[in-house]
Image: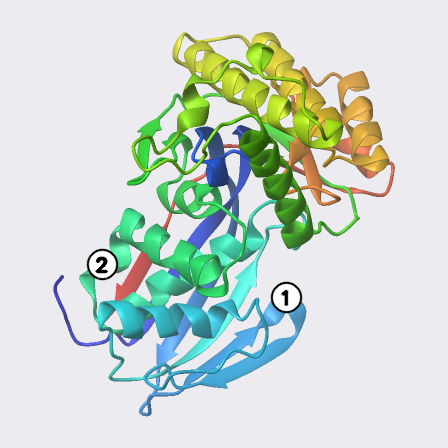
Amino acid sequence: MAISPPPAHIESSAPGRICLFGEHQDYLRLPVIAMAVDLRVTITGKRRADPQMHLTLTDIGETFEFNPNEPFPYRHNRDYIPAAANVLARLHGVRWPAGYDIEITGRIPINAGASSSSALQIAWTAFLLAAAGDSRATDPEFVAHVAQFSEVGEFGSPGGMMDHYSSALGGVVYLDCLDPIGWERLPGTIGPFVLIDSGTPKATNEVLGRVRHGVEAAAKAAGIDLHAANDPSPLLNVDATKLPPPEDAEQGAMLRAALRNRDITHEARAAMLAGATPVEIGRLLDAHHEQLAHGLGISTDRIDALLDSARAAGATGGKINGSGGGGSCFALAPDNADAVAEAIRAQGRRADVVRPGEGLRVITQP
């Protein structure tokens, strides 16, 4: 890494994302296909004479101040802003010669499954690196690694890695979630989509914990070691139709849904590389949502009804987006996205027409 004097002005930004295929797969080290969207979190900062970081989170009306050179005791298990500084200092030796007056704004729906918190963590991690004069601020994979650890690993949360890598990399990506993570850029011509906020907050940790426990318990009962040392992803070679009958029917349904979603993700990757039509992609989205709704049990009646409305307005397919239990969904509407969005807004829900977005962006001025 190269170290330079801290810049006088910094602007960093990162996009939200939708998970096209592979929802609830990344923490099982199974592949996902995600798309960064053109809704972003933006952080702007002006250098101060002292080492204090003064943050104003404009959209939620909060302020926060701390010195990143001093270990910060967490106030709760989602204290992500100081966590990024703690991780960079403790694990990567980063120090800050100056503080900043900082404003954070965003257009991503909050607590809706569109990865607003992870986009913030990507933009914030890059900002902290830029403020330290660290050249790794513009390395999307390094930023994603640090941001993911500071949001998930630092707090022992059950989440995966999709959100951070898809936000940092941008566009449409196929993520191989083995360790180390690998990725492939897919054609970015798909869309537009209509991102729909159901108006019901999601329950990330609760849903992730329930589904992860259910899949892992069913895998153990079936004799599948998800964390075998000699095979980091044994689920890749398991045929769902050959699993023994589970003692716990709900957990067995979760495992079968996880395996079917794995197969749908592979089908979707092949289809996208072959230039599939929106009707073909829509069919796969609907098949994926069926597994998420009825196999994993993460959808809601409201989200199912909103997706039905989007299809009735001309969308070719859609699915719940994010951990579930509420939050957002999206519909593929290649020819009539505005009409689909208006049909949703007529029901009093937020609807954004979104397309593939640029990944992490950092601009500095000396």
In the picture shown, does residue 212 fall above or below 10?
A: above
Density class for disc 1 (Cα within 10 Å; few <14, some 14-19, many ≥20) is few
Residue occupying image coordinates x 80% and y 36%: 300
Q: Nearer the viewer, residue 96 or 153?
A: 153
Based on the displayed image, in which of its 4 quarters is residue 143 positioned? bottom left
Density class for disc 2 (Cα within 10 Å; few <14, some 14-19, many ≥20) is some
Amino acid under label 2?
Arg
Which residue is under mark 2?
136
Q: Nearer the viewer, residue 239 or 353?
A: 239
Based on the displayed image, in which of its 4 quarters is residue 282 positioned? top right
Which residue is under mark 1?
59
In the picture shown, does residue 138 fall above or below 133?
A: above
- Give the distance between the C-alpha atoms of the residues marked 1 and 2, in whole angstroms: 28 Å
Residue 102 picture location, percent across and down = 45, 75
Residue occupying image coordinates x 57% and y 15%: 240
Residue occupying image coordinates x 31% and y 69%: 88
